[in-house]
Amino acid sequence: MKRTLIVLTILCGCSTEANHIGNPLLLPFSAVSTGISNATYNQRRGQVEVYVKSNHTAIMADITNGGGDHIAQAMDIASIPTEDRPARLIQLRSDQALYQTSPEALITALMVYS
């Protein structure tokens, strides 16, 4: 009887219903997938950071002018979808005073938009 109760309790965790843990049998695969996703994100963020810090003045000029090669390249590196870029540029222009003094804030905004 105890074994049956234990097995039933474990199997309840294998439900396809929404829960905060997910299927416990898939946790090892989820961990690997999450690790790969995080590594990919961190690599892309590092590339965006290097580009933005190296070209901050030119990127800010592009934002002020409503577009240009440097902000387009930053958006390419950040993987911002092409169809979203006009709206994102408007958002960047509205907060350009913040981004002028904080390249880190610009990097974060570009990564959030991607």
Image (cartoon, rainbow, N blue to C red):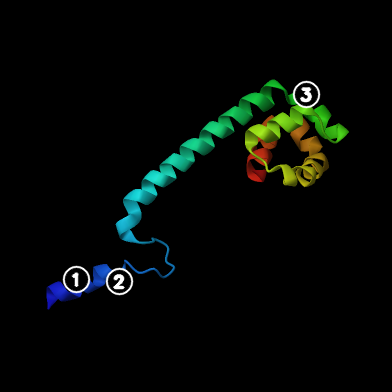
Residue 60 occupies quadrant? top right
Numbered badge on residue 32: none
Q: Is 65 positioned to the left or the right of 8 in the image?
A: right
* Sequence order check, earlier mark of 3 and 2: 2
Tag 3 near tag 2, CB within 8 Å: no
- Whole-percent x and y of residue 13? 31, 67
Q: Which residue is mark 2?
A: 12
Q: Is residue 94 above or below residue 48?
A: below
Front position in the image: 40 or 111: 40
Numbered badge on residue 6: 1
Q: Which amino acid is tagged 3?
A: Thr
* Sequence order check, earlier mark of 1 and 3: 1
- Whole-percent x and y of residue 99? 75, 34
Q: Which residue is mark 3?
A: 57
The single residue placed furthest to the right in the displayed view is 65
Q: Is residue 33 above or below residue 71?
A: below
* Sequence order check, earlier mark of 2 and 1: 1
Kind of element beneath mark 1: helix
| Residue neighbourhood size for the residue with mark 3, other residues' Cα within 10 Å, grouped as few (<14), some (14–19), many (≥20) | some
Front position in the image: 11 or 104: 11
